[in-house]
Image: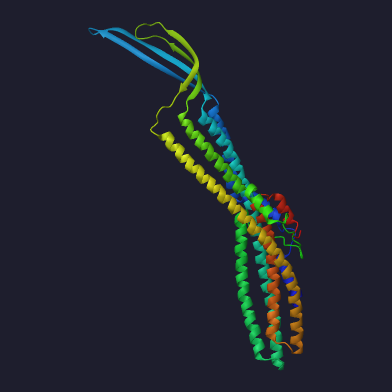
């Protein structure tokens, strides 16, 4: 049986796509539901969405009701004679309303609340993009590990045939014992490599399971000879510019800077007066008193404006302003750091995609050359112009080239997703597009 046929059979046994194989889009949807990191980000966004409501509360009126009920007893005596013994009750309530008319700190807090909501949305969008990259990376890591297992098993099978041929040739006297020893050494090495590859495959499957919360089972593989599109636009500066403006990490830091600037204004408002509209209604009902048994009822309504001018607070306001100015400077530097990180990530991913495309093209040519070299060495061995080690080296070169080619394709695809994530443009539609490269 020819080694090329053996490779096909073993790969089909390990990597066959049946009706139950999961593709990348299905795995991604599983991760949307089961990944705890993404679930945490979703809960954080829901919590952050309440900041606007909490900030608005400082601009809206507050209404409260208070009340009391009291039962009193009164007794008196003179010269040991009881002269009075009675009880009476007092109950009442007060309804109060306060509407801020001028509270600059409350207004700034409301603006901070809206910015916090926007920051929460940016953080959630970043978490969703990170999930796409993590799922894709884990998915193609499993495929690469499967390729490694298939390659080493195919190589072991081919070496087994070469070992058997070397033994037969030695028995009939057409080859030396050296050929047998070389083939045996390669076979033992292939066994060790197979164990390592199977262990690595299990590790990669476990990493994918950690994201989706259950074993993934069989996964869809790339279509043979799949073509990967280059980045669009083709200029790296376009990607870097997008990263510096649209990357969600940058957007989040921009929101943090604006929140810090609002914090300065809010703390400075500690020097400003406050004005509130206040209104109240009180009702009291008393059945008697210590002086008389007659009851009384009273109602009191009031409305007015209440103002307050802060004069001195132990330098606390000034200290808070200085603190918020320092924190604003920190936020500004964090924003610059986020921009540089996003730009560097875009450059690295862009170079990774272009380098990967070049590697894929070179390895495709190397695969053809390696196959031709193997065929030539095998024929030369049969006619006696090549030795066994030449055939073994050619076999190893072919399988290594095929494995490197598959790995280069996986890395190029993942780098393409990382490039879009760095630029802030990665969406679920990109997962669908990559999913179209798989067998279904």
- Residue situated in front as seen by the camera: 79 or 157: 157
Residue 76 at least partly seen: yes
Does 359 sit left or right of 200 as displayed? right
Is 385 above or below relative to 288? below
Q: Residue at x 47, y 28 (%)?
A: 272
Quadrant assignment, res 179: bottom right
Q: Residue 309: where, in percent of width, then height?
A: 44, 24
- Residue situated in front as seen by the camera: 298 or 56: 56
Quadrant assignment, res 189: bottom right
> Could you tell me how many numbered marks the image carries?
0
- Residue situated in front as seen by the camera: 357 or 146: 357
Q: Residue 144: where, in percent of width, then height?
A: 66, 65
Q: Residue furthest left?
A: 79
Quadrant assignment, res 73: top left
Is 172 above or below relative to 103? below
Does 221 sit left or right of 296 as displayed? right
Is 356 above or below relative to 389? above
């Amino acid at each position: 049986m020819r080694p090329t046929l053996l490779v096909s059979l073993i790969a089909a046994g390990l990597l066959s796509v049946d009706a139950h194989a999961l593709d990348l889009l299905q795995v991604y949807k599983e991760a949307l539901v089961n990944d705890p990191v993404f679930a945490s980000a979703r809960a954080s966004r829901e919590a952050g969405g309440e900041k606007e409501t909490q900030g608005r509360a400082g601009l809206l009126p507050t209404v409260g009701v208070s009340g009391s009920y009291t039962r009193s007893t009164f007794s008196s005596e003179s010269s040991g004679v009881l002269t009075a013994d009675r009880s009476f009750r007092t109950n009442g309530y007060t309804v109060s309303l306060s509407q801020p008319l001028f509270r600059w700190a409350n207004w700034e807090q409301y603006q901070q609340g809206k910015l916090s909501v926007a920051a929460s949305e940016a953080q959630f969008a970043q978490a969703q993009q990170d999930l796409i990259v993590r799922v894709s990376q884990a998915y193609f890591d499993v495929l690469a590990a499967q390729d490694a297992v298939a390659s080493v098993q195919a190589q072991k099978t081919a070496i087994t045939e070469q070992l058997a041929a070397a033994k037969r040739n030695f028995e009939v006297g057409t080859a030396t014992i050296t050929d047998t020893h070389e083939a045996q050494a390669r076979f033992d090495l292939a066994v060790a490599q197979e164990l390592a590859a199977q262990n690595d495959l299990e590790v990669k499957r476990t990493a994918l399971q950690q994201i989706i919360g259950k074993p993934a089972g069989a996964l869809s593989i790339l279509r043979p000879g799949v073509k990967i599109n280059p980045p669009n636009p083709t200029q790296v500066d376009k990607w870097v510019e997008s990263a510096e403006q649209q990357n969600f990490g940058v957007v989040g830091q921009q929101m943090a800077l604006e929140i810090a600037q609002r914090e300065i204004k809010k703390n400075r408002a500690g020097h400003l007066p406050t004005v509130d509209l206040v209104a109240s209604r009180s009702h009291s009902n008393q059945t008697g008193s210590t002086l008389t048994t007659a009851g009384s009822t009273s109602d009191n309504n009031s409305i007015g404006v209440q103002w307050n001018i802060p004069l001195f607070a132990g330098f606390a306001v000034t200290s808070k302003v200085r603190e918020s100015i320092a924190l604003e400077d920190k936020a500004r530097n964090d924003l610059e750091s986020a921009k540089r990180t996003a730009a560097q990530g875009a450059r690295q991913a862009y170079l990774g995609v272009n380098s990967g495309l070049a590697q894929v093209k070179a390895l495709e040519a190397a695969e053809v050359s390696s196959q031709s070299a193997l065929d030539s060495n095998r024929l030369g061995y049969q006619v006696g112009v090549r030795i066994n080690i030449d055939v073994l080296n050619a076999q190893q070169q072919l399988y290594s080239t095929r494995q490197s080619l598959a790995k280069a394709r996986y890395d190029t695809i993942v780098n393409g997703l990382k490039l879009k994530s760095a630029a802030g443009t990665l969406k679920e539609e990109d997962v669908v597009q990559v999913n179209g490269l798989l067998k279904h």
